[in-house]
Amino acid sequence: MRYISPSLLAADFSDLKGACEMINRSSAEWLHIDVMDGVFVPNISFGFPVMEAVRKHCVKPLDVHLMIVNPEKYVERFAEAGAYSVGFHLEAVEDPMPALNLIRKHGVKTCLTINPDIPVSRLEPYLDQVDMVLLMSVYAGYGGQKIVPETPERLRRLSAMIRARGLSTLIELDGGVTVDNAAGLFELGADVLVAGSAVFRAPDPLAAIEQLKGNQ
Ligand code: DX5
Ligand code: ZN
């Protein structure tokens, strides 16, 4: 599948309702919600009140990406706040299974994420335990970064691992996605591309989403 999940992090925070309305009108399938705690990553973004406000206005599924320590403490609140999927970083926990089970208990899709310095083989034991894996193609913490050069190789390897086992685990890729590299990333096996700057900083965000999907 070829889904686009625009990242709200790059939106104009003084007009989140407008951002949601644009997403509702667009052909984007999901809306990506980046939660940062200033500990797991150096930056702080937003939390529950913003997510709940967005939930009221956005009709698309909310794809939540937690960049926080102790995700097991918070995953249920994000599930209850209306998440479609909740993902957290493998490197933030000793054992991802308790948090994954909590997410699943709420009927919410599970996602495990890794930063570019974590070998994709670390995801292998969990590929049949999650709905989706999120491969960071920049270091988590900031929007507007350039894709790390190892990304295509990592994506290819992860995609091969999933196919070899006949699994239907989705691959989401996050960071540095542009209208120029999106087609190649889908080609290498990404199912969902997150795009912050490429959508919200574009002169015409609706057209940018179409371009990212390869429709224009
Ligand atoms: C980075 C976030 C990304 C970010 C993507 O820590 O997880 O989702 O918003 O932004 P762009 O698309 O601008 O690289
Ligand atoms: Zn993200």
Image: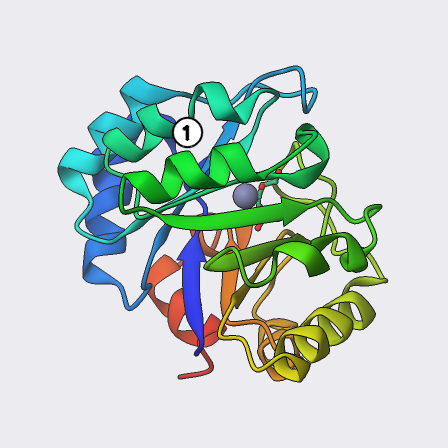
Q: Is residue 118 visible?
A: yes
90 displayed left or right of 193: right
**Position of the C terminus by quadrant:** bottom left
**Label 1 crowd (10 A; few <14 / some 14-19 / many >=20):** many
Q: Toward which corner of the image does residue 49 lie, by quadrant?
A: top left
**Position of the N terminus by quadrant:** bottom left
Q: Position of residue 48 (x, y in %)?
A: 33, 21
Q: Position of residue 100 (x, y in %)?
A: 48, 41
Q: Position of residue 80 (x, y in %)?
A: 24, 30
17 displayed left or right of 216: left
Q: Residue at x 50, y 72 (%)?
A: 191
Q: Secondary structure at mark 1?
A: helix
Where's ligand 1: which quadrant? top right
Q: Position of residue 55 (x, y in %)?
A: 21, 36
Q: Residue at x 19, y 48 (%)?
A: 21
168 displayed left or right of 207: right
Q: Nearer the viewer, residue 48 or 23?
A: 48
**Which residue does the numbered mark 1 point to in the structure image?**
75
Query: Is residue 119 placed above or below 53 in the rendered structure?
Result: below
Q: Residue at x 62, y 47 (%)?
A: 113
Q: Is residue 11 visible?
A: no
